[in-house]
Amino acid sequence: MSKATNKEIVPSREDLFNPVLKAIHSLGGSASNAEIADRVIEDMNLTSDVTDVPHGTGRVSELEYRLYWARWHLKKSSLIDNSKRGIWSLTNVEHNQIEEQENLTEEIPTENEEPVTDDSSDEIAKWRDELLTTLLKMHPSAFERLCQRLLRESGFIEVRVTKASVDDGIDGNGLMRLGGLISFPVLFQCKRWQGSVGSSVVRDFRGAMAGRADRGLILTTGKFTQKARKEATRDGVPPIDLIDGELLIDKLKELRLGVLVKTVEVVEVDTEWDGFSGS
């Protein structure tokens, strides 16, 4: 099946409007991009044949691309909004409207929007692709040290990278301190991968954690499969937090680690200024 034909099996952005609203509602009225995507995939029973269809030549899937535009249109129509930390929430939507399955998106205009081509979307994501390429070219030990730095900048203390000869699947450990009062040990693993990280990686890491810590963290340049995400939060076993390539890039940007963010200064003339008036 050709790539063009593959894209035809991916829900359109219009078909994703209501599933996105329902996903945010079912997650308590607010959710991250990853949480929305996972819930939409689950609710719509989308298989890997659909979720893995690529968009253009970049690393973004066609579903992720269309979810992005679905959220954009919903925000433009004042149905949802997002915070600086990238958390989406319902705005002018009553929860009972979603529960009663009212169609709140019939009036959202999309036909007059300029089409976004692969070239323009690739341009928008250029710096992200460049950063990901740089990460993939790093030496494994250098990538581990970068993850160590990221955790320190994020509030972890006593962060150490283990020696390769004795790591047993554990690349490092540290203490996460909450509110400056409570701290707990966290083991972490760094996966400089291109592609999907499956549930077996999560299970193996949890096995290596046994008796050493009650919390784990996996950081990767790749993507976690839906089964991997479910395995990470499975009941009755130590939870494992997952940082995929997209979130890793976001954190590096937020912490200004290897990313320069330039602010454009906007200068306007105040023609109403008192100093300009008078004779």
Image (tube, grey):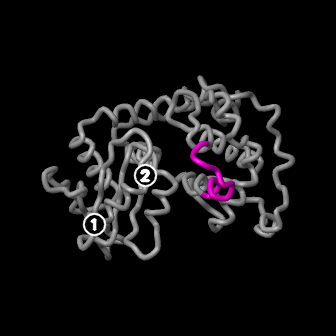
Q: Which residues are magenta?
A: 39-49
Task: Give the amino acid at mark 2.
Answer: Gly
Sequence-wise, the earlier of marks 2 and 1 is 2
Q: Which mark is residue 209?
A: 1
The residue closer to the viewer here, 277 or 198, is 198
Task: Give the amino acid at mark 1.
Answer: Met
Q: Quarter of the image holding residue 194?
A: top left
Q: How many marks?
A: 2
Q: Position of residue 257 (x, y in %)?
A: 34, 42
User: In the displayed structure, would residue 82 be above or below residue 181?
Assistant: above
Between circles 2 and 1, the one closer to the viewer is 2
- Main secondary-structure element of the magenta-colored stretch: helix
Q: Residue placed farthest to the front in the image?
A: 1
Q: Position of residue 255 (x, y in %)?
A: 38, 47
Q: Circle 2 sits on which residue?
A: 198
Tell me the residue at 70%/35% (across/down): 8
Q: Position of residue 111 (x, y in %)?
A: 82, 33
Q: Quadrant of the N terminus?
A: top right
User: In the displayed structure, would residue 80 be above or below residue 63?
Assistant: below
User: In the displayed structure, would residue 187 be above or below residue 180?
Assistant: above
- Is 48 a magenta residue? yes
